[in-house]
Amino acid sequence: MRLILIGAPGVGKGTQAKKISLKFNIPHISTGDILRSEISSNSELGKKAEEYVNSGKLVPDELITGMIKEEFKKDKFKAGFLMDGFPRTLEQAEKFSELLKELNLNLDKVINITVDENEIVRRLTDRVVCRDCNKVFKLSDFAKDQPLKCDCGGELYKRKDDSEEVIKKRFEVYKKQTQPLVEYYKNLGLLENIDGLGTENEIFERILARL
């Protein structure tokens, strides 16, 4: 199974990607996780990427394309893959199609999770993340006097790119640069639109029904 997962920031792509990966036993490639790892390690790549992430802009192609090519060299990708967070632009999609053609691989489906902009803002401004294991929590689930701690004991914090101002900028970038992917994959007969409202399991069942 070879899949791509697309959708605006905050629609729940990461959560659904992990469920799909487990269900079909295929590796999950999250460029977001890779980039956050680079940023936390303060590498040269991470320093460059952080400037774009904190301003709500997309990270340039040259900073992520090489990582994906390296990933595909690993044996675990022979059974398939799930791309999460790439491609994000029409140009990236076209380059990715060229790469797959070169490797004699075909995509099975492109899953597009859709959620209203106001709901996305509500979700992301309520999000906190563990510094140690990157597990995501809802700030509203904690009492005012309750310590912001993860199950693993790590401290929970709010990402700089989860402020309302940056979120709205990211959504504008998405509409301008990423939404054309919907038409691109629709024209290729690969697109499946999935309603992103509801519980994690409800959304997952909708995805399975299309796969």
Image (tube, rainbow, N blue to C red):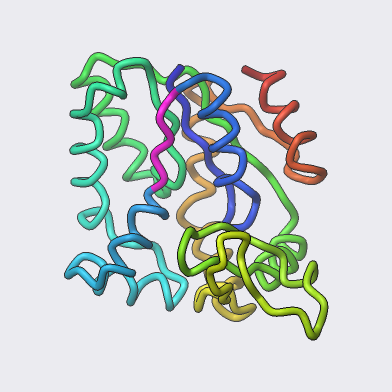
Q: Which residue is pictured at 74% across the width and 26% down the height?
A: 205
- Most extreme residue toward the bottom is 145
The x, y position of residue 92, in whole percent, is 32, 44
The x, y position of residue 188, in whole percent, is 47, 22
Q: Can you say whether 168 is above or below 84 in the image?
A: below
Q: How many marks?
A: 0
For the residue pair 16 and 165, the one nearer the viewer reads as 16
Q: Which residue is pictured at 40% across the width and 53% down the height?
A: 33
Magenta range is: 26-30
Q: Is residue 47 left or right of residue 89?
A: left
Q: Is residue 190 left or right of residue 33?
A: right
Q: Which residue is pictured at 43% across the width and 21% down the height?
A: 2
Q: Can you say whether 19 is above or below 25 in the image?
A: below
* Secondary structure, magenta segment, majority class: strand
Q: Is residue 67 left or right of residue 153?
A: left
Q: Which residue is pictured at 60% across the width and 44% down the height?
A: 15
For the residue pair 114 and 67, the one nearer the viewer reads as 67
Q: Is residue 172 left or right of residue 140?
A: left
In the image, residue 27 lies in the stretch drawn in magenta:
yes
